[in-house]
Image: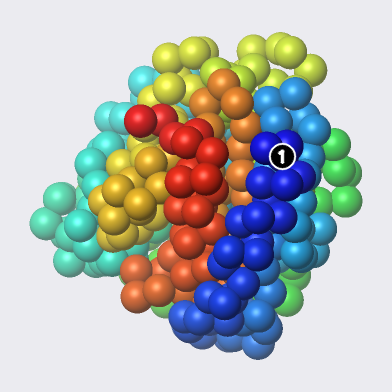
């Protein structure tokens, strides 16, 4: 089966599920998105892109941005961040204060919000402008200089960031933030509000399918760090549904409450799917079904 036939077949199979689930409404800027959107893109490791549905429509990538922030931190220093953040699945909601207090300010993994705040803190120290560093990486790898922050979503999220502020202050109370809390929160919020299409997202993540090599062939991550990042996505990337997702799909992936999911088939391709209706864990309902259908149809999983 050719790649275009694959994405078309997946789209057709999940069509009855599009619109199922609930759009995230705890960020008012996301609440108005039409749940009937569905986009799917497959980028081969050589950069060819195939898409179905709304694959060229920009959407709010939210927590999918956490993959690129972590990749940037690892590209500077593979070890330092792991002294401040764990690598275990959370088994709790992604914004749990209770777990963070129990773990004495060391977030369970880099993809829960507290962990991502620590990653942003580290990237702030390293670059001075984490959101711009993430944007530069995304723009270069996707080949699209127009990728940017959705200012309306960023403003809405900033106005409703009480819980993230509580997490950041709790981390800081355990001396696990090195920059001012508000500076870290501003950067984190902007990063989450990056908007881009499935096609651009799949292409931008190609370095994870190429064992750490950028689109121009230069090395961005060591082979080991690319492996570790993919492994962390597999175990922790889809919230408190990571076990079920691994069972159904069998691929490293990271989801966001905007309804996006990025998945990696190492040494072969990357997939980005977007459908805003979420399940109770916060993962895209039709998006998960699409990736499940994809690996079942092609046999391309890591297992
Ligand atoms: N910006 C969202 C938050 O901080 C990201 C959540 C997500 O996509 O997991 O709550």
How busy is the neighbourhood of tag 1: few (under 14 within 10 Å), some, or many (20 plus)?
Answer: some
Q: Kindly tell me whether mark 1's CB lies below 8 Å from ligand 1.
A: no
Residue 217 visible to the viewer: yes
Q: Is residue 27 above or below residue 80?
A: below
Camera sees residue 203: no
Vertical arrangement, residue 176 with respect to residue 125, above or below: below
Residue 110, picture quadrant: top left
User: With respect to residue 236, does 87 lie above or below?
Assistant: above
Residue at 51%, 81% in the rendered image: 20
Q: Residue at x 79, y 17 (%)?
A: 216
Q: Is residue 135 above or below residue 100?
A: above
x, y (%) of residue 193? 65, 63
User: On the rendered structure, is 80 left or right of 289?
Assistant: left
Residue beneath the point at 76% across and 51% down:
51
Read off the residue under disc 1. 3
Name the quadrant of the C terminus: top left
Q: Position of residue 79 (x, y in %)?
A: 36, 21
Q: Position of residue 226 (x, y in %)?
A: 48, 23
- In the image, 75: left or right of 92? right
Q: How is the image coloured?
A: rainbow
């Amino acid at each position: 089966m050719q790649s275009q036939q694959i994405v078309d077949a997946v789209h057709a199979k999940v069509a009855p599920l599009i619109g199922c689930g609930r759009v995230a409404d705890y960020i008012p800027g996301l609440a108005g998105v039409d749940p009937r959107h569905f986009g799917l893109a497959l980028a081969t490791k050589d950069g060819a892109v195939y898409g179905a549905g709304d694959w060229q429509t920009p959407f709010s990538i939210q927590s999918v941005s956490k993959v690129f922030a972590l990749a940037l931190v690892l590209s500077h220093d593979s070890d330092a961040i792991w002294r401040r953040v764990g690598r275990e699945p959370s088994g709790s909601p992604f914004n749990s204060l209770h777990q963070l207090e129990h773990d004495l300010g060391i977030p369970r993994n880099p993809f829960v919000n507290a962990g991502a705040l620590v990653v942003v803190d580290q990237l702030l120290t390293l670059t001075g402008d984490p959101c711009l560093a993430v944007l530069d990486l995304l723009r270069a790898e996707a080949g699209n200089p127009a990728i940017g922050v959705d200012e309306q979503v960023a403003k809405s999220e900033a106005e409703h960031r009480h819980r993230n502020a509580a997490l950041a202050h709790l981390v800081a109370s355990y001396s696990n933030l090195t920059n001012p809390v508000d500076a870290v929160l501003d950067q984190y919020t902007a990063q989450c509000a990056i908007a881009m299409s499935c096609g651009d997202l799949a292409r931008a993540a190609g370095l994870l399918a190429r064992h750490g090599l950028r689109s121009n062939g230069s090395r961005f991550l060591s082979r080991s760090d690319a492996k570790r990042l993919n492994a962390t996505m597999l175990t922790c990337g889809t919230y408190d549904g990571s076990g079920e997702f691994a069972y159904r799909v069998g691929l490293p992936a990271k989801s966001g409450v905007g309804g996006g999911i990025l998945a990696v088939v190492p040494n072969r391709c990357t997939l980005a799917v977007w459908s805003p209706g979420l399940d109770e864990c916060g993962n895209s309902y039709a998006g998960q079904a699409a990736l499940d259908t994809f690996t079942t149809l092609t046999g391309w999983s890591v297992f």
